[in-house]
């Protein structure tokens, strides 16, 4: 169903509309890119004529800005010369890292020397701007003053090494000052008072949304410091001339800066501690008559953020205030549903809210996080055209609900600005937003053609240079890539038609978006499946995990040796939870010296037959074990939490690592079977490494990864044709027992894999003195 239909349906549901929309947007978090972009195309098809007019309009602005070089800020010129996929661009990012995050001067000097060498070798850019050329010429010269890092690290003597104690600190200080100048282009002031004072003398900064820099609290002290900073900023902003909320500068608030455990797993704590802080700040913002915008964060925090926003919206004390708002990221596949939810919330609570529509600031981390966590798909679009189309779909939607929402369009893209102007209904109240230090040339060209342009608010960071780096990195990543509009905008080498291309037409010509990045389940291609993970930002996922753990909490587990499949009945040693020693999880006992000798002998006797088993069969056992692990997720997660004391995210990660070990070694075995690797033998001759076993392997695993490392050691040895006698960590015998039985069920012969738990002697004495026959191999 198109988003417009969802809004109408929700409006007809009365009291249940908000809950219905919330359930729909949760379900849409990881929906397919093709489905989400298909809805955007369907919603935008009726306005294609308006979008074509926007394209022509945007082209005029790009040409006008290119003809007027006076308005180009230094940052935009730098990004044009140094895209992040260039050697110089990467070196600049490395310089920022070296200067701001390396406390040790010696290591900082080494990093600086490396980055400057890269800039020197890549050459000075061809920009005619004297300041830009002079700056990078000085960078190249500084590089020649520092010693060659590789030579120094290898111990080679050089004249430069003698001058380093004098030269290096000078270069370091000069570069730090240069990076501070770069930071000044993005920061309005180190304090809110300084920022407001600057705004009185700079007309471009008369209307701002101030962002107190900070990437998230790590401690309660951090959270209190950020709270005090926000409270002081709000009190300072109250001194502005009395005007309407949207005609005054406001503030943006980052929820993770006010709560060090800002995650859905800690939702109870967040509601208990963060909600009162936010209510207090919102009440002060309402008294000050300023805008109060909740900044966007990562996708897995959205559900929790919406909880906080709903709490603020339902506060009767601020109902007449129209300054409560939030940022929505259009690259999220559920963005239109979030907007529908916000509009419904505003109507239910009898207030008008603000929405800052942005394209998205965490794309790289969202992609990598989804792959690393083994999610079913990505929460964001992988196609730029799909993101741009989603933004336009959201523009339409915001104008459709302007009775409940005040739209704020944050963009530096000429086509997007033109599309907003074309899609805006007559008399609609809204504003544009841009980042401080960027977009001046674009909006200057727009104002020249549209004198009555809607207000343009500046997103204005406030803080010290040391606090700038994470913000600066996001801005450079967003705008420094070759596909970025900011990078292309003033570059005369890129045709204007390409700069203002219509994303809807681009998307339609592709037949709808398909993912441009390998989906998380297919991360390893055809070689093997990625282990399935959990979306910890989804309440339904957390509820299912907690239900599994509750069921398993009643289970009592058996431990003890497993000798060729035989399990002793005399297990009597209780295994207790490290988090609550009163809880008995199961019973176990150690293997005796005789049982260990028996295990070694029986494993040695069984190994030749296992070695003769086809590699594909052995690999198949590992694949089946991986599947069984995922099917019995609840059992192993419960053991990892109860016996090993793992947190739930750590337990999920370890279970996935064990699954990955099984599939990885199965894949490696198949690879070696098809193309044996040449390795040197013990006397230097070339020796073909085949999957021929070498006898009995003793695998001793540690306590900190009682499932993953235990499984990884065993499966590597097994798939190569060896028998295994495993000794788990004494603290976690039940996990090892359960995994051993699972491997037997997956097809590993019981005699080939023996489990002999023991705490010190007699295991070490027996294992070291026993000499099992070796069958085949070297």
Image (cartoon, rainbow, N blue to C red):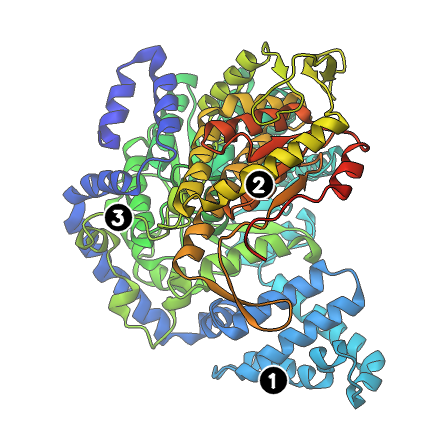
Name of the residue lying farthest toward the bottom: 159
Q: Earlier in the sequence, mark 2 or mark 3?
A: 3
Label 1 SS: helix
- Above-or-below relation of 614 to 766: below
Of the residues tagged 1 and 2, which is closer to the observer?
2
Disc sitting over residue 723 in the figure: 2
Total residue callouts: 3
Task: Report the front residue among 363 and 701.
Answer: 701
| Image-quadrant location for residue 14 | top left
Task: Report the front residue among 744 and 366.
Answer: 744
Q: CA distance from mark 1 to mark 2?
A: 64 Å
Dot 2: within a 10 Å radius of its alpha carbon, few (fewer than 14), some, or many (20 or more) residues? Answer: many
Task: Report the front residue among 247 and 751.
Answer: 751
Q: CA distance from mark 2 to mark 3?
A: 49 Å
Q: Earlier in the sequence, mark 1 or mark 2?
A: 1
Q: CA distance from mark 3 to mark 1?
A: 44 Å
- Above-or-below relation of 753 to 55: above
| Horizontal and vertical percent position of residue 682 | 64, 67
Would you say 405 lies left or right of 638 here?
left
* Residue matched to label 1: 137
Dot 1: within a 10 Å radius of its alpha carbon, few (fewer than 14), some, or many (20 or more) residues? Answer: some
- Residue 227 seen in render: yes
Label 2 SS: strand
- Residue at position x 63%, y 62% in the image: 184
| Quarter containing the N terminus | top left
| Horizontal and vertical percent position of residue 22 | 39, 23
* Residue matched to label 3: 513
- Residue at position x 45%, y 71% in the image: 80
| Quarter containing the C terminus | bottom right
Would you say 638 lies left or right of 232 here?
left
């Amino acid at each position: 169903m198109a988003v417009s239909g969802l809004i109408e349906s929700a409006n007809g549901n009365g009291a249940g509309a908000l809950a219905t929309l919330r359930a729909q947007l949760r379900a849409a978090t990881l929906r397919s890119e093709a489905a989400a972009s298909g809805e955007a195309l369907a919603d935008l098809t009726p306005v294609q004529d308006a979008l074509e007019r926007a394209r022509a309009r945007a082209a005029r602005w790009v040409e006008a800005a290119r003809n007027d070089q006076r308005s180009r800020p230094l940052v935009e010129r730098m990004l044009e010369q140094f895209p992040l996929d260039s050697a110089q661009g990467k070196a600049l990012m490395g310089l920022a890292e070296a200067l701001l995050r390396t406390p040790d001067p010696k290591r900082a000097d080494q990093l600086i020397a490396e980055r400057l060498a890269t800039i020197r070798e890549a050459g000075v850019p061809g920009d005619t701007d004297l300041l830009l050329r002079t700056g990078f010429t000085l960078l190249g010269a500084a590089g020649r003053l520092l010693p060659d890092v590789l030579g120094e690290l290898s111990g080679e003597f050089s004249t430069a090494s003698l001058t380093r104690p004098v030269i290096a600190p000078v270069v370091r200080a000069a570069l730090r000052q240069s990076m501070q100048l770069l930071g000044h282009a993005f920061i309005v002031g180190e304090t809110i008072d300084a920022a407001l004072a600057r705004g009185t003398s700079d007309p471009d900064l008369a209307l701002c949304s101030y962002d107190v820099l900070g990437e998230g609290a790590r401690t309660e002290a951090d959270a209190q410091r950020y709270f005090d900073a926000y409270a002081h900023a709000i009190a300072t902003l109250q001194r502005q001339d009395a005007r309407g909320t949207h005609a005054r500068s406001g503030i943006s608030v980052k929820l993770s800066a006010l709560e060090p455990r800002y995650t859905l797993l800690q939702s109870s704590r967040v509601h208990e501690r963060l909600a009162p802080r936010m209510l207090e700040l919102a009440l002060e913002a309402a008294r000050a008559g300023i805008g109060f915008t909740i900044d966007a964060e990562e996708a897995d925090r959205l559900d929790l953020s919406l909880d906080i926003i709903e709490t603020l919206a339902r506060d009767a004390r601020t109902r007449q205030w129209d300054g409560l708002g939030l940022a929505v990221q259009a690259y999220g596949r559920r963005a239109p549903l979030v907007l529908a939810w916000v509009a419904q919330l505003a109507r239910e609570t009898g207030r008008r809210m603000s929405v800052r529509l942005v394209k998205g600031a965490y794309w790289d981390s969202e992609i990598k996080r989804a792959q690393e966590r083994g999610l079913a798909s990505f929460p964001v679009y992988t196609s730029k055209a799909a993101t741009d189309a989603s933004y336009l779909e959201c523009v339409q939607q915001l104008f459709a609900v302007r009775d409940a929402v005040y739209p704020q369009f944050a963009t530096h893209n000429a086509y997007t600005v033109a599309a907003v102007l074309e899609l805006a209904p007559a008399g609609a109240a809204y504003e544009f937003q841009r980042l401080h230090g960027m977009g001046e040339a674009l909006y200057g060209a727009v104002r020249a053609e549209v004198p009555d342009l809607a207000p343009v608010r500046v997103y204005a960071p406030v803080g010290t240079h040391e606090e700038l780096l994470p913000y600066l990195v996001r801005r450079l990543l967003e705008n420094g890539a070759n596909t970025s509009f900011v990078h292309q905008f003033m570059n005369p080498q890129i045709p204007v038609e390409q700069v203002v291309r219509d994303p809807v037409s681009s998307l339609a010509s592709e037949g709808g978006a398909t993912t441009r990045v390998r989906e998380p389940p297919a991360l390893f291609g055809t070689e093997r499946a990625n282990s399935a993970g959990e979306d910890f930002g989804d309440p339904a996922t957390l509820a299912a995990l907690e239900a599994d753990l509750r069921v398993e909490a009643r289970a009592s587990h058996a431990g003890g040796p497993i000798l060729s499949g035989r399990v002793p009945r005399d297990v009597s040693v209780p295994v207790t939870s490290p988090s609550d020693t009163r809880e008995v999880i199961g019973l176990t006992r150690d293997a005796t010296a005789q049982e260990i000798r028996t295990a070694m002998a029986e494993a040695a006797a069984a190994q030749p037959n296992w070695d003769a088993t086809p590699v594909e069969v052995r690999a198949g056992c590992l694949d089946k074990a991986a599947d069984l692990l995922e099917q019995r997720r609840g059992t192993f997660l419960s053991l990892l939490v109860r016996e090993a004391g793992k947190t739930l995210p750590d337990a999920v990660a370890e279970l996935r690592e064990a699954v990955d070990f099984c599939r990885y070694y199965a894949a490696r075995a198949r690879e070696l079977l098809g193309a044996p690797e040449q390795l040197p033998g013990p006397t230097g001759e070339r020796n073909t490494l085949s999957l021929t076993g070498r006898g009995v392997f003793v695998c001793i695993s540690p306590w900190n990864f009682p499932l993953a490392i235990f499984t990884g050691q065993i499966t590597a040895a097994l798939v190569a044709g060896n028998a295994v006698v495993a000794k788990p960590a004494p603290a976690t015998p039940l996990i090892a027992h359960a995994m051993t039985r699972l491997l037997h069920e997956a097809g590993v012969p019981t005699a080939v894999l023996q489990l002999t738990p023991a705490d010190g002697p007699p295991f070490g004495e027996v294992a070291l003195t026993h000499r099992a026959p070796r069958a085949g191999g070297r």
